Image: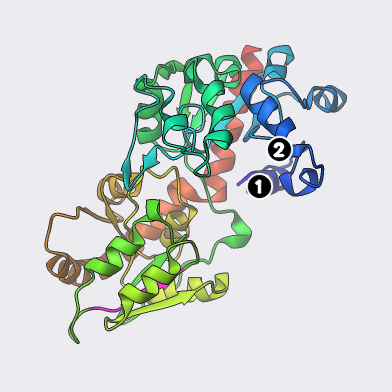
Amino acid sequence: MVESELAALGRAGHTVELFAARTDDLEADRLYPVKAAVRVATGLGASPLPAIRRFGPDVVHVHNLFPNFGRRWVEGLEQPLVATLHNYRPMCVNGLLFRDGHVCTLCPDGARWSGLRHKCYRDSRVASLPLTVANLPGPAADPLLARADRLILLSELAADVYATAGVPRRTMTVWPNFLRSDLDPGAERAPARPDGFLYVGRLSPEKAILRLVRAWPGGGEAPILRVVGEGPDEAAVRSAAEGKRIEVLGAVSRSHVIGLMRTSTALVVPSAWYEAFPLVYAEALAAGLPVLAWEPNVVARWADADGTGAKTTWHVDLAATLAEVEAAFPSLRARCRAIFEERYSERAYVQRAEELYAALTRRA
């Protein structure tokens, strides 16, 4: 998303500079784990302030400081500061609010040593300790969140979660991720007969794809499910798919995914965590593909409220739900593309960004 924002703002005529510290470049240092742990726990450490001052921007926009930048440097920043919160890291050690197969809010609810107790980061108490210490004061006291003139949340659900944890709602703006213009597959005529359901994403517990594969109806009359992606649950997914009309495709090219989106009945999003903003949702809408999503993840809210698909739960008859979707979803394809243009296109993003940055610079 950072690269997409750089490209979109550049195409719109703005001068943008990226100040980045990449783990791949830093971890050759044998002391990197220790240095990163100290940065995370204390907020002190590497700072982009000298580079920012040389560049002299009107606005500074932070996307992710973990684990390669300190956080205290923002207190010396002179320009308006915007921060995008892509996950729940300032209140959750693993950043997902998800543990042992379910949503977990122990830490933001006040039991702030829970991440350490449950080894929520990389299944290690040693690795979880710096994050636990950093989060003890609560997200409202995080140096970045406290200093930011505006916090960008990717959904109303994320904004609600942060507000419940004590972050002032007045500092938040909700805007979603977007699909930049050179990745937009463009609208094409809907297929005469959409074929099958499609999952695209990581094969991991929080995505609940294994649960969906196990629940998928058997028999020759069941619709086909195509699963695209890799991850720790891949072997279990392949095993559970045996004997069912399920194709586990592994990792495939983006052009292959877009082709599948153009011909499928629906994208399925069974995630068991809240999600932030899975870009695959915007890609599906751009291709005119409706979405079936399971609560509690945020895509279920969007699909229902936007008329781009439907929400469901694990407590209904899946076979009946799939039959209803096959009958109703082909008529939603034009609606999906229209919602994409309105909310998730590059044009919509640039308009939001320009309005926000202009307002902040006028106020500064």
Residue 172 appears at what percent x and percent y? 47, 24
Relative placement, left or right, of 38 versus 224 is right
Q: In this view, does 327 lie above or below 159?
A: below
Residue at screen point 31% across, 57% down: 270
Sequence-first tag of 1 and 2: 1
The residue closer to the viewer here, 158 or 94, is: 94
> Which residue does the numbered mark 2 point to in the structure image?
33
Residue 200 appears at what percent x and percent y? 44, 64
What is the secondary structure assignment of the residue under circle 2?
Answer: helix
Indicate how the structure is coloured in the image: rainbow
The residue closer to the viewer here, 276 or 235, is: 235
> Which residue does the numbered mark 1 point to in the structure image?
8
In magenta stretch: residue 325: no
Residue at screen point 28% across, 44% down: 296
The residue closer to the viewer here, 216 or 61, is: 216
| The furthest residue to the right | 54
Magenta region: 223-228
Residue at screen point 47% across, 33% down: 88
Residue 52 appears at what percent x and percent y? 80, 26
Residue 346 appears at what percent x and percent y? 57, 49
Which of the 4 image quarters holds residue 221? Answer: bottom left
Q: What residue type is labelled 1?
A: Ala
